[in-house]
Amino acid sequence: MRIAGYSFKRVKIGRNRLAVASLTFLLLISVLLIGCTELAKPTATAVVFDPTPAPPGTRELVLAGGSAADIAALAQPVELPEGNASNGEQLHTTLGCAACHSIADDVIVGPGWKGLYTRAGERTEMEAEEYLIQSITKPSAFIAEGFTNVMPAFDYLSDQELADLVAFVQANN
Ligand code: HEC
């Protein structure tokens, strides 16, 4: 046969040789495809950079030597029931806060509570309410400047008692 000046010889290929050639070809393609799928697999899990911001107050807590559990507890949002200021005022006496805290601005052992609510919101990055609860339940987490770490932790109070104390501090501001 002649096409555009080139002559082609018809090569006769036996059936068996054709079969072997096709099989070899298929085998090569399969190996190639298997090889490709293996190559397509990721060699390592991708590193996702997704930093979680530290909860507010962490720095103070770390500086004050707070434990990992204390720091984790900071991340929990504070959800308190409605507080009752006059119950809070009674708790100031019955719980013994009055032994160290005046409700005016004089110092007994700890800071007086006059203006405490405003101060509480400025002490750390925490909201006033959150700071007050931390100060009552974990007083060593943040030590007010000029004072020492002598306040016992009132970590057994109910949510209602905490809410009442906060309500009183706010009302007494
Ligand atoms: C033995 C004395 C003592 C008793 C009792 C005591 N505190 Fe304190 N308290 C302190 C001292 C000292 C500080 C300042 C050092 C610090 O920050 O822990 C303080 C700090 C605080 C603060 C933070 C004040 C600020 O200006 O940042 C709060 C709020 C507080 N106390 C609430 C209470 C409550 C509520 C009670 C009662 C349930 C109580 N305290 C009982 C001594 C006491």
Image (cartoon, rainbow, N blue to C red):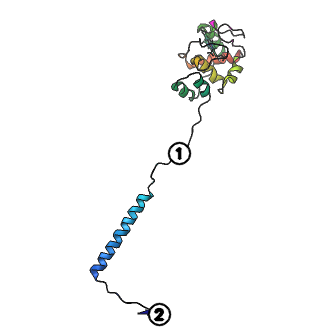
Q: Residue furthest front?
A: 6
Corner quadrant of residue 110 = top right
> Disc 1, ligand 1: is the CB inside 8 Å?
no
Magenta run includes residue 166: no
Q: Residue at x 61, y 27 (%)?
A: 59
Range drawn in magenta: 99-115
N-terminal-most mark, 2 or 1: 2
Give the total number of marks visible in the rendering.
2
Q: Position of residue 98 (x, y in %)?
A: 64, 7
Name the mark on residue 35.
Answer: none
Q: Residue at x 39, y 62 (%)?
A: 35
Query: SS for tag 1?
Result: loop
The answer to whether residue 16 is visible is: yes
* 114 sits to left or right of 163: right
* 107 sits to left or right of 19: right
Q: Position of residue 79 (x, y in %)?
A: 59, 26
- Could you tell me which quadrant the C terminus lies in? top right
Vertical placement of residue 53 versus 4, above or below:
above
Q: What amino acid type is highlighted by mark number 1?
A: Val
Q: Position of residue 103 (x, y in %)?
A: 69, 10
Q: Residue at x 68, y 21 (%)?
A: 120
Quadrant where ligand 1 appears: top right
Task: Find disc 1 in the rendering and name its residue.
Answer: 48
